[in-house]
Image (cartoon, rainbow, N blue to C red):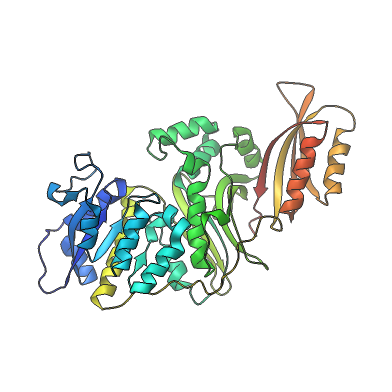
Amino acid sequence: MTTSATSHPQTPHLKVALLGAGTVGSQVARVLLDSKDELALRSGVTLDLVGVAVRDVDAKRDYEIPRELLTTDADSVIDAADIVVELTGGIEPARTRILRALNAGTTVVTGNKALLAAHGRELQDAAAASGSQLSYEAAVAGAIPIVRPMRDSLAGDKVTRFLGIMNGTTNFILDQMDTTGAAFDDALAEAQELGYAEADPTADVEGHDAAAKAAVLASLAFHSTFTLDDVHCEGITAVSAEDVATAAEAGYVIKLLSVGERTEDGVNLRVNPVMIPRNHVLGGVHGAYNAVFVEAENAGSLMFYGQGAGGEPTASAVLGDLVSAARAIARGAEGIPLSDHAKLPAVSMDNVTTRMAITVTVKDRLGVLAQIAQVFADHGVSISTMHQTEDPKDQAISVLRLVTHTGRHRDLMDTVGALRELPVVAEVLSVIPVETGD
């Protein structure tokens, strides 16, 4: 039920500027205008939407924002506001606009994971210098509350690892491939038809979106500064229907996982398709949903699950930050600077220990298996299971599917490289890490 947008003389008023009125921004505007009284009761502050900066005031939107609020002059609404909500995305002009607000002591709420992954420390430093607040719950996993728990609730604990399904588009695609047997291209087309995937899905299917979120979350989890460049990133475009079916036969499901893992030397950050046990808590995350599994020394294992994308779910996270920021401003509190005191370095994949599922096609001749096994032995990699089938398209070729024991990533990849050079190997079809679920 909506409430009227009446004023509240008994509560302080704060001016809110909204940058961007797309899928998420239009929903934020809707709640600010239609539920103004309710928000005032919750926050103790009347939030007055004073301007919405857009590129085209005549564009069609999911919610019809009063025309008098729309403007193409972003600077004017920023300068008039107590709180700026940035939902335009991208690096520029978002970075310049956010810095303009923070440098003036204006609180900023954003969902811009790409910007945070590239310039998060710069923005945090600007907020600290002016005593303003920078909040970004919506930047990671949509409606799921994970930023505030990681920043606040676990501040007294030591996070050792997180594993997350942080991109709804890729989870939908992989889930369709798993549950219906669809090929990648068909599952992607369905995701686009349903509005889960953009016309250009590159950022999603190549893993860039999930990698940005991993960098943002890792900076909070490990009290250090990480950027997109610190994340090892692989997408899902090479995952075939055969890979998914083979994983299913072995009791696994393939998910695009964002992982932050504390090691002896620092923190390893990676995004890649991973086979995880179907009974793992992340194995049952279906459709476009997201989930983040966190391991901490004292809290143990924690699971955060919910809708990871869409206008209304993401708007929920934005509005949560907005209400929280309004409460703090009303109390006269300054923003709390985000510490990177640990200064842990990002470490490469080389010494990460994992298992690999490797699928190759080999020439069907005497001694092939012995040659394959020798390559693994030469690189100190142990084979856990091996399954050989005849290629239905070519009887002179066999498909060999191997799963290794745990080994160093560098040794495993050197083994794959040697397999590619082996004369009896026709092709290395896929290499997918295996999460044991430990």
Q: Position of residue 319 (x, y in %)?
A: 29, 60
Q: Residue at x 72, y 41 (%)?
A: 358
Q: Position of residue 210 (x, y in %)?
A: 50, 50
The reply, left or right, for residue 210 in relation to residue 373 is left
Q: Is residue 250 visible?
A: no
Residue 333: quarter of image = bottom left
Q: Position of residue 17 (x, y in %)?
A: 23, 58
Q: Nearer the viewer, residue 352 or 297?
A: 352
Q: Residue at x 52, y 62 (%)?
A: 218
Residue 391: quarter of image = top right
Compared with residue 264, is residue 23 higher up or lower down, i.e. above or below? above
Q: Is residue 32 visible?
A: yes
The reply, left or right, for residue 22 in relation to residue 148 is left
Q: Position of residue 201 (x, y in %)?
A: 45, 38
Compared with residue 108, is residue 436 higher up or lower down, i.e. above or below? above
Q: Nearer the viewer, residue 427 or 16?
A: 16
